[in-house]
Image (cartoon, rainbow, N blue to C red):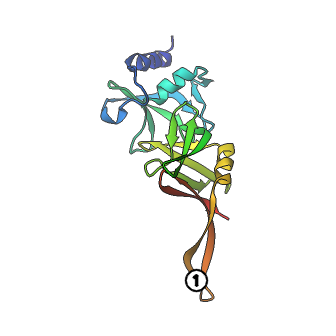
Amino acid sequence: MTKQASGTEHILSQIGQFKGPAPVHEWDPPYCGEMDMRIAADGRWYHEGSPIGRPQLVRLFSSILRKDPDGYHYLVTPAEKVRIQVDDCPFVAQLMDVEEVGGESQITFTLNTGETVTADANHAIEVTVDDDNQPHPTVHVRDGLWALISRSVFYSLVEVADQVSRDDGKKANNNNQIKTELVVSSSGSEFVLGTV
């Protein structure tokens, strides 16, 4: 067994049976170095260059994932924390469900780990632009961890969006400029996907 593999086994041996994410923000273990583990931009997990093929193992590791103020991602147990590489977002939203609850629309995403996230004031949808000037849509999962919204899900999100015209506050030729935004609502919060 390699030293790296034994490190993985050691981390696994420390993880209890948590229903959902572990309370990693309550733990302050010592830093124990880097592990050769990477989460690719498509959400796939790799260990020592090989994909982790067991979904249960990915779910287990994702339950102890934390992003610290230094901007790095760590796997955290009560006894240790190790740094891993994350190429983009640690999660990917692969499915979307929209339903009416109490007269309000709710948008719920299912992540590649099986976890679900409903967009609301604490789980914002944000759309930025990447280096290729393409939309980079994300949804906040928990404690600074974000999920990339897959292209197909983003297209579905755009399909349910409303076009809202707003005064952008800028004047041209003494006239205010009107911009039309694509807006979705979920759990009483509005999120702008982009402009038309």
How busy is the neighbourhood of tag 1: few (under 14 within 10 Å), some, or many (20 plus)?
Answer: few
Quadrant position of residue 192: bottom right
Quadrant position of residue 165: bottom right
Above or below, 56 relative to 165: above
Q: Secondary structure at mark 1?
A: strand
Residue furthest top in the image? 1
Total marks shown come to: 1
Residue 36, x across and y down, in percent: 52, 27
Whether residue 63 sits left or right of residue 25 in the image: it is: right
Whether residue 140 sits left or right of residue 136 in the image: it is: left
Residue 117, x across and y down, in percent: 50, 40
Q: Nearer the viewer, residue 5 or 63?
A: 63
Q: Residue at x 61, y 21 (%)?
A: 53
Residue 74, x across and y down, in percent: 43, 33
Above or below, 12 relative to 186: above
Q: Residue at x 31, y 34 (%)?
A: 26
- The residue labelled by disc 1 is 171
Quadrant position of residue 11: top left
Say which amino acid is labelled 1.
Lys
Q: Nearer the viewer, residue 98 or 77?
A: 98
Q: Residue at x 58, y 54 (%)?
A: 127
Q: Residue at x 51, y 52 (%)?
A: 103
- Assign the C terminus to one quadrant of the image: bottom right
Above or below, 37 relative to 152: above
Residue furthest bottom in the image? 174
Above or below, 128 relative to 5: below
Residue 68, x across and y down, in percent: 39, 41
